[in-house]
Amino acid sequence: MHETVLVIDFGAQYSEVIARRIRENNVYCEVLPWTTSTTFIQGKNPIGIVLSGGPDSVYLENSPKIDPAIFELGIPVLGICYGMQLMVHLLGGKVTPAQDDKGREYGKAVAHFDTHCPLFKRLPNRSVAWMSHGDHVEKIPSGFKVSGTTKNCEYAAIYNEEKNFYGVQFHPEVEHTQCGKEMIKAFLERVCHAKGDWSMKDYYKQAIEEIKKEVGDKKVLLALSGGVDSSVAAVLLSHAIGKNLTCVYVDHGFMRKNETEEIVERFSKYDLNFIKVDARKDFMDALKGVKEPEKKRHIIGKTFIDVFSKVANELKGIDYLAQGTIYPDVIESGSINGNTIKSHHNVGGLPENLPFKKIIEPLSKLFKDEVRELGLEMGIDEALVFRQPFPGPGLAVRIIGDITDEKLEILKEADYIFREVIAKNKYQRKISQYFAVLTNMQSVGVMGDKRTYQYAVALRAVSTDDFMTANYVRLPYRVLDEASRRIVNEVKGVNRVVYDITSKPPATIEYE
């Protein structure tokens, strides 16, 4: 039995990011809703409990709360943002709404730490923390000490070392907090005394068992895009159910240059039931004249299901639809906290009346880097495991506005050149995701002493390990210059190239 840490979720966008940070320290972690009983929590025998953030105010009558008995179990507790405020509220302190800018913080803040606190030992006594709170702690409970402050937050971090209760007002789980990973590691090792005895091999074994138990001898149709996520899902499912899996690759016409041919060649080498469906006309007809991003995604989702349904009916006896959905897709589609950022074709874009008994998503609790780790664990080629992430709707959500054959051709060529330049300069493994976007902006240029009025292409390159937050990559000017010159000279219809230097948040990685 592996040592376990539980994350109690209060509707936070980053609950699974916390779990990811814990798992990367080789400690098994589960996320449970705030409605989970204390008896159930105790039965899990956790070595630690993390209370997540959340959008509510702890002092309101109907806000999510836990049984205060959790604090009497003798289990270390770390409260993050709302979780810290809830701990304060339940243990006799006071939380109030900020009346002005004092006490309210959003974004990066410089925090000062007491390095005597176990969470901050051997860390800088001053670093950047990511804040996101409108309420603030006015009074801490008896027995607690202050271990962190910012300009606008008197209680940025607190702790009761005797009872092993710790609270941070900021989010240590996100990349924007400079030493956040180290703080979570300190909680696990110094406070919970974790040994770190869990690995992706354990996840693999558990996933195989769960799939076998769920599916039995029934048949499964997998929506295979050829990307990292669906490919890893295909191999995982094949290990669990063998020939009862059929992989269907739908060519919707929005793939990158030469990609469909590469996918067909790659998967013909695997021992899988593989079917390719040419549905380019269906998708283009359905999207004709559509400009609004969410509408695009929903149409694409519905068209995918229509195609899969048709194939399933032809094959007969298909009970389950499987997808390579990963956790960032679930969160952005609002399936966890109800806050839709953008609908993913395999989550928020799905229609309600599915012709399948159930959807299976064996990767829906994993982040991109974990999916890659699982892929390597199963022996999948590195070239496929580290393939550039590509959205299910493909180039359709990288063309701003309506989609035409001309725009598709422009973007395919521009994106191909950008990827060539990145590869030539050996930046593939240094960047988490990079691609070109065709904006709906046309501007005046001059080529061969003649006036042009053509499209602007935006280049995007980001660095991230969880795809929930991301920083733009500071590519050398020589790389950007080469990409820009080649695109303008080689792609007909483009006279301007710009580079996106926006991080996530406030932007998303994709444009639509």
Image (tube, grey):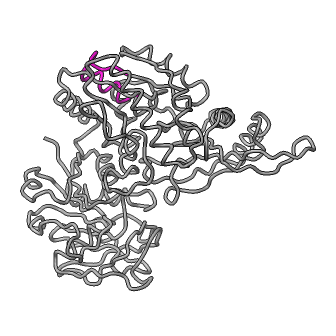
Seen from the viewer's position, the closer of residues 263 and 119 is: 263
Residue drawn at x 25%, y 55% is 189
Depth check: 447 or 432 in front? 447
At horizontal 32% and vertical 37% (from top left) the residue drawn is: 363
Q: Is residue 223 magenta?
A: no
Along the horizontal axis of the image, is 474 left or right of 203? right
Verify whether residue 240 appears in magenta: yes
Work out which quarter of the rendered image holds the N terminus and state it: top left
Residue 276: percent from left, percent from top: 46, 19
Give x and y (percent) for residue 262.
Answer: 54, 21
In the image, is residue 135 above or below residue 302?
below
> Relative to residue 64, is residue 320 depicted above or below?
above
Q: Quadrant of residue 502?
A: bottom right
Asked if 295 appears above or below 131 in the picture, the reply is above
Relative depth, front residue between 454 and 436: 454
Q: Residue at x 64, y 34 (%)?
A: 408
Direction bottom: furthest residue = 99
Name which residue lies at 38% across and 45% down: 348
Side of 379 relative to 61 (left or right): right
Find residue 425 and report its image quarter. top right
Which residues are drawn in magenta? 231-247
Q: Nearer the viewer, residue 201 or 501?
A: 501
Question: Magenta span: helix, strand or loop, mainly?
Answer: helix
The image quadrant of residue 487 is: top right
Tell me residue 230's x, y (percent): 39, 31
Total numbered circles: 0
Residue 209 percent coordinates (x, y): 18, 30
